[in-house]
């Protein structure tokens, strides 16, 4: 999962749905993520060299597992209305090669991997070292928040705003448009950066309100017209039934 505007919440909801269906799922990261408050059926494992057999045993008791190498510092929690409550710690993730070995040794487990960070923004442009995507992944979910449309381009709405100013040829404070969103999400050096060629790409367009955003379907159609995306999911991740629409090629 890459991009901005709901990666952690989406992973959390997917993991919860899989657990309800009797399936095992692990949330982890190849970079860093805030440590979530665990649900009753959850567990946190910290291991720099995680053992697949031990992971399997933990999953038998706690099908919602968070896996990381270690806690990394203590932080003041950001003043965000975030649907996934967090503890004041960051978790340091695991290298892609380590995760690749675990994929092979733990068949039947769904891995939900945060491969970059966005600092609470709704749109993300990657840094030079991002994203960190294991080459074995079957799907990459590229996320952006529709509620940034019409909002000013600034450090609150866009992560790496200086790059956005340059790439979009738009000054700080200019209004974000659907064309700008599509430009970022369809660029192989931006939203699609590092996506393995054999992996399917899915765009996740998030929004706060349960009523479909006026620009949602237009943006979805433009994303699909660029051929790399297999489908576009529009979701209000806070809603009881989060998926509002799915647009496929």
Image (cartoon, rainbow, N blue to C red):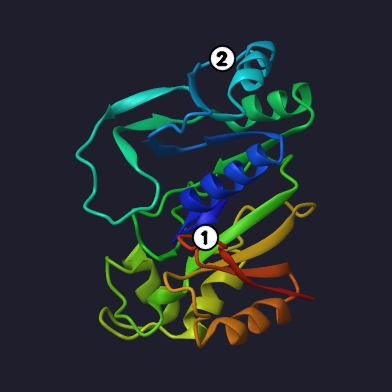
- Quarter holding residue 101: top right
Residue 130 in the figure: left or right of residue 229: left
Q: CA distance from mark 1 to mark 2?
A: 37 Å
Residue 128 in the figure: left or right of residue 13: left
Residue 145 vertical placement versus 20 (above, below): below
User: Which residue is found at the position 75% from the left and 24% from the top?
Assistant: 106
User: What residue does disc 1 label?
Assistant: 240
Secondary structure at badge 1 equals loop
Look at discs 1 and 2 and give the one toward the viewer.
1
Residue 68 in view: no
Residue 233 in view: yes
User: Which residue is found at the position 56% from the left and 70% from the top?
Assistant: 185
The numbered mark, 1 or 2, whose residue comes first in the sequence reads 2
127, 57: nearer the viewer:
57
User: Which residue is found at the position 29% from the left and 80% from the top?
Assistant: 152
User: What residue does disc 2 label?
Assistant: 49
- Quarter holding residue 154: bottom left
* Callout 1 touching callout 2 (CB < 8 Å): no
| Residue 113 badge | none
Residue 103 vertical placement versus 113 (above, below): above
């Amino acid at each position: 999962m890459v991009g901005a505007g709901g990666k952690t919440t989406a992973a959390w909801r997917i993991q919860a749905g899989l657990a309800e269906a009797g399936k095992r799922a692990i949330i982890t990261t190849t970079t860093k993520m805030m440590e979530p408050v665990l649900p009753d059926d959850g567990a946190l494992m910290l291991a720099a060299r995680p053992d697949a057999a031990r992971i399997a045993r933990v999953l038998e008791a706690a099908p919602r597992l968070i896996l990381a190498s270690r806690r990394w510092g203590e932080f003041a929690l950001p003043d965000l209305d975030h649907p996934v409550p967090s503890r004041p710690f960051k978790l340091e993730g695991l290298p892609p090669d380590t995760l690749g070995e675990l994929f092979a040794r733990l068949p039947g487990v769904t891995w939900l991997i945060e491969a970059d960070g966005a600092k609470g923004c709704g749109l993300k442009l990657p840094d030079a070292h991002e994203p960190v995507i294991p080459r074995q992944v079957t799907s990459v979910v590229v996320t952006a928040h529709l509620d940034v449309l019409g909002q000013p381009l600034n450090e609150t709405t866009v992560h790496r705003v200086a790059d956005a100013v340059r790439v979009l040829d738009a000054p700080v404070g200019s209004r974000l448009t659907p064309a700008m969103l599509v430009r970022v999400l369809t660029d192989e050096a931006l939203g699609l950066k590092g996506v393995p060629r054999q992996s399917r790409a899915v765009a996740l367009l998030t929004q706060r309100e349960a009523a479909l955003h006026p620009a949602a379907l237009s943006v979805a159609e433009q994303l699909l017209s660029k051929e790399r995306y297999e489908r576009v999911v529009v979701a209000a991740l806070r809603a009881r039934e989060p998926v509002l629409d799915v647009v496929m090629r």
